[in-house]
Image (cartoon, helix red, strand yellow):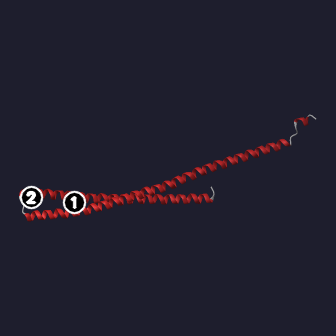
Amino acid sequence: MSNGERRGKDRLTGVARWRALELEDARLAHAAADDALNQQQRVYDEIHSRMEDSREFERQASSHGVSAEALRHARAYTQWQTRELEQQRQHVTAAERVVTEARAEVVSRFQAVRVIDRLRERRMRAAAIEATRAEQKLLDEHALLREARHHSNTEHQPWPSMRSE
């Protein structure tokens, strides 16, 4: 292997490591985004559950004759929860968008790693073919030299017909 080939292989190995690290970073970012989405979804579910409890309280309170002031407070609280729920839904949607982008980044980085892997495999196959060719060339040259030596040795020997004379 020549110095140029070795440097090219070292560069390709360095690029492969770099791309693998980028892929790992993208995977970690995706996992973090997924965790953030799960947290936002839990908050949404908690708010939704409390809002359902408040609505159930309103229904029961109106049927049991609770004061109008208490009912207004309960409705105001439910309206506030509805606004909070909508804000949280927006947070969940934004977190879903971040997860989708992070997933796309993971796929993109994985594809970059695969490109480098395929290039390395192709270069290894080419190097193996080149080594086989060099070996065959050496064998062919060796055979030619043996044939030339054999031929030159037979030139100096007298021909059988010349001996009888």
Q: Residue at x 63, y 50 (%)?
A: 130
Amino acid identity at mark 1 = Ile
- Count of marks overlaid on the render: 2
Query: Are the residues tagged 2 and 1 within 8 Å (C-beta)?
Result: no
Residue assigned mark 2: 62
Quarter of the rendering containing residue 68: bottom left
Quarter of the rendering containing residue 152: top right
Quarter of the rendering containing residue 10: bottom right
The residue closer to the viewer here, 26 or 69, is 69
Amino acid identity at mark 2 = Ser
The residue closer to the viewer here, 64 or 35, is 64
Q: Is residue 162 above or below residue 73?
A: above
Query: On the picture, is 28 further left or further right than 148?
Result: left
* Other-residue count near label 1 (Cα within 10 Å), few / some / many at <14 / 14–19 / ≥20: some
Q: Could you say where residue 96 lies in the image, as x and y percent from the top left?
A: 33, 58
- Which of the two discs, 2 and 1, sits closer to the camera? 2
Query: On the picture, is 83 further left or further right than 153?
Result: left
- Secondary structure at badge 2 equals helix
